[in-house]
Image (cartoon, rainbow, N blue to C red):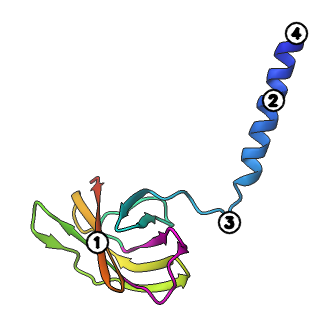
Amino acid sequence: MFRTSTVLRSCAVSFLLIAASCTPDTPPPPAKEAHANGLTISYRLPTGTIPLNEPFPVIIAVESAAGPLPATAAVQVDARMPAHNHGMPVRPEVVPIEPGLWRADPMLFQMPGHWQLIVTVGTAPTTTQVAFDIHVRP
């Protein structure tokens, strides 16, 4: 009985600690992460999902070993459907939010299928580009 009670108490404490760390202001974890040229580039969807044929924003995070990139770094975001050889019908504006974070808006995936979210980061003297594979359902 003592052992079961201790295990249950430990599980309850762990659950409460995890639940306390998840507040409405806590952003969801990055959907995907890529590493290239000493940078870690990730994206997340503030809306949680990609709506079909409706505009949505994407948050891009970029870090180096020294920490978040300055907001002055050049970040571009685009998306393409490789199988159809076309991109989005819109060109997103990429705006710095704070060091290491940018918001690309509007994004618009007008068709279901395989898309690539392409993030290009310019840091003198190099340019780094990564592509994230995304499948949009009908």
Q: How far separated are the C-alphas under marks 4 and 3? A: 40 Å
Q: Residue at x 23, y 61 (%)?
A: 115
Residue under circle 2?
10
**Which corner quadrant of the image does residue 131 belong to?**
bottom left
Q: How far separated are the C-alphas under marks 4 and 2? A: 14 Å
Which residue type does callout 4 highlight? Met
Quarter holding the N terminus is: top right
Residue under circle 1?
129
Q: Nearer the viewer, mark 1 or mark 3?
A: 1
Residue under circle 4?
1
Q: Residue at x 81, y 29 (%)?
A: 10
Q: How far separated are the C-alphas under marks 1 and 3? A: 30 Å
Which residue type does callout 3 highlight? Asp
Residue under circle 3?
25
Q: Secondary structure at mark 3?
A: loop
Q: Secondary structure at mark 1?
A: strand
